[in-house]
Image (cartoon, rainbow, N blue to C red):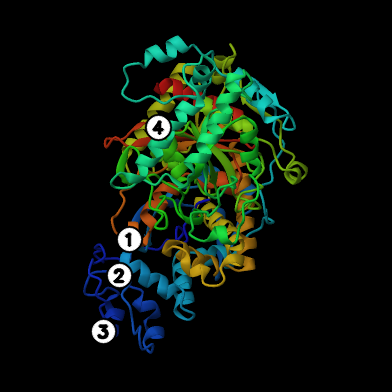
Amino acid sequence: MTTSALSSTLFTKPPGKELRPPIASPVLRMPNLDEMAKSGVTNTGVPTFAKTFGRITRNIILFQIVTIPVVTVECRYKCWTSFSQVKMGKKIVMIPANEVDLIKVKYDPGAIEAPDLSGIWLRLFVMLVEMPLIGPVIVSYLKKKNKIQEMLRDTVIPEPPMFRPEFPPQEQESGVVCFNEDEKSQDRVESAFACLPHYDPATRWHSEINTPFRYWKICDYAYSYRSKITTPSMVAEYVISAIEESSNVKPPTPLLISFDAADLRKQAAASTHRFEEGKPLSALDGIFVAIKDDIDCYPHPSNGGTTWFHKVHRVEKDAVCVSRLRSCGVIFVGKANMHEYGQGTTGNNVNNGTTRNPHNPERYTGGSSSGSAAIVASGICSAALGTDCGGSVRIPSSLCGVVGLKTTYGRIDLRGVLCEWGTVETIGPIASSVEDIMMMYAAILGASPADKLSLRPSLSNLPDLSSHEYSTILESVRLGKYTEWFNDVLSTDISTKCANILNLLSETHGCKIVEVVIPELQQIRTSHLVSVGAESLASLQPHCHNGNDKKLTLDTRTNLALFRSFTGSDYVAAQRLRRRAMYYHMEVFKMVDVIVTPTTGMTAPVIRRSSLTTGETNMKVTGNLMRFILAGNLLGLPAISVPVGYDKQGLPIGLQIIGRPWEEATILRLAAAFEVLIS
């Protein structure tokens, strides 16, 4: 679950103003208010909010005015144009989505200017936005300048609201193996195993014997256990040693929030005993898996990355998805670190320490499933579970160079997740290979009884990668590419690497790349912000008593200040925009089978030293990381991130494949094809 409170703050850079980074001095300046109102800039060169709310704060004794540093953030979000709206006086009337001429829609650049704060400036900003009088003024100012008010309150939206994803009927995919969701997880895992290419241990082990680092796939462990080359108990000792070492290195890399070596040895011993008796539960028996801290895994507490949530949320049993894995013999190593309550995209966590990127310890892992992605990328675990509310599985998977699957909304039962009733969140597996993703997905899939009735999911299935029709099916796949959006990245290394692998797939298998257009990306972002904000607040607010809200990190408190400003009418307007976005995407899917983008608009960002102790709100990073993510969550579409190479700094680059509702098999087949081409 990832969001950022101010990721939607868009306003124009003041003409002729030179923008410089915020001063490092912790000393509060008290500049002349009238002089500031004339110039709009303090003598430090840092833009301020003085012109807007200076008069309101003039008579406040302690805070006559406070200089709040703001940096123009060149995230270059592209925004919809007047081809989908008509301005009538002070109000805007949107043209019905089915009447918008997509050919005329332009993808115009826009600059994002928003607070980029850490250290004392972040503390000061949070103090202000939580003040009864000043806070609402600041939030309102930002929302107005970034057209959030305009989109939600001054716009006539002709479509009715869509409060959760509503999917049109889909045709059955070809070349797939279907599953009965009511059958045992162990049986589904065995069926998934049969879908994989033939496993040849001699070829697999000999071909990579001289490589300095190699991921062990689930099939490698399954073969080794059954051949008595090793045992789960033997592997457990290496896992325990690696986890303990990760917490003791400098700088520390806290992968897990909750870890019990004795419990891990107990699980491994039980698995070893089953193999000794020749009765393993499934191909996942003895496989080591980490669980994100917002998913219940008994007996570990669920804190959601906070310091106190276990006091108000008692874990008495496994989440449904965890229970399904446990029935397959999976060994749980503990609860993985995460960005507090999913409220960020970097993985920063001042409560438990910030997880470091295995490819460069000075870089973030991405979030919010930071520990889940890092522990897989480190080779300690074969797989992990994360949750994805705004890219929280795909972003860290991309930044850490592993595979992350976001399933269709409703495909996996959310009971036992901290925000189990949300409309944008899903559970997803993270692993080092597409094959391992397929095995994990087969084990945990299955909608809740309520979702089976309301969403009517299509049959669960997987691509048959062992079929002779594999290449033939790929020939007919149409890849949708919105070129201007695709190329809107911080470094051309990303777009070039992703475009090259797309072209290679087309040349190798005959796939067709089709140019598409997706309107109203700014509206999609605003609709997602309101939706996830309302759901996060509703989930957390009942527990924010007795000072618990003040125990949250500063960036989480910043988000909550924005979320509390949204009204019921704002929420309804956001759901109307949601329906428009669904219409546009379903129209695109009439022309293509999938939409392909880079997973993120940047590779792993640098960890600022000041953010390790206070956290940070960095809209430049948030905007770049979430650029291609949000439609998958707002509309509930399945999506997968697969690594396709590295930038010039040696940091991983991910490619995202977005599919039609319920068509996980299609995106998994393509991800497997990309994986083969890369290897």
Separation of disc 4 and disc 2 at Cα? 37 Å
Q: Is residue 40 visible?
A: yes
Provide the residue designation for mark 1: 72
Q: Name the secondary structure under disc 1.
A: strand
Mark found first going from the N terminus, 2 or 1? 2
Location of the C terminus by quadrant is top left
Q: Which residue is the site of mark 4? A: 498
Tell me the kind of residue under disc 2.
Pro
Q: Residue 598: percent from the left, percent from the top?
A: 43, 38
Residue 663: x and y, percent? 63, 32
* Cα separation between marks 2 and 1: 9 Å
The image position of residue 275, as x and y in percent, is 58, 21
- Numbered disc 3: secondary structure: loop
* Residue 454 lies in quadrant: top right
Q: Position of residue 435 (x, y in %)?
A: 52, 25
Q: Residue at the location (43% across, 38% down)?
A: 375
Q: CA distance from mark 3 to mark 2?
A: 14 Å
Callout 1 crowding tier (Cα within 10 Å): few <14, some 14–19, many ≥20: many
Q: CA distance from mark 3 to mark 4?
A: 51 Å
- Indicate which disc, 3 or 4, sits on the residue closer to the N terminus: 3
Determine crowd level at label 3: few under 14, some 14-19, many 20+ residues with C-alpha closer than 10 A. Answer: few
Q: The disc labelled 1 sits on which kind of residue?
A: Thr
Which is nearer the N-term, disc 4 or disc 2?
Answer: 2
**Residue highlighted by disc 2:** 47
* SS label for mark 2: loop
Amino acid under disc 3: Asn
Give the left or right position of residue 42, taking residue 634 as reference: left
Left or right of residue 47: residue 215: right
Disc 3 + disc 4, Cβ < 8 Å = no
Query: To which residue does mark 3 refer?
Result: 32
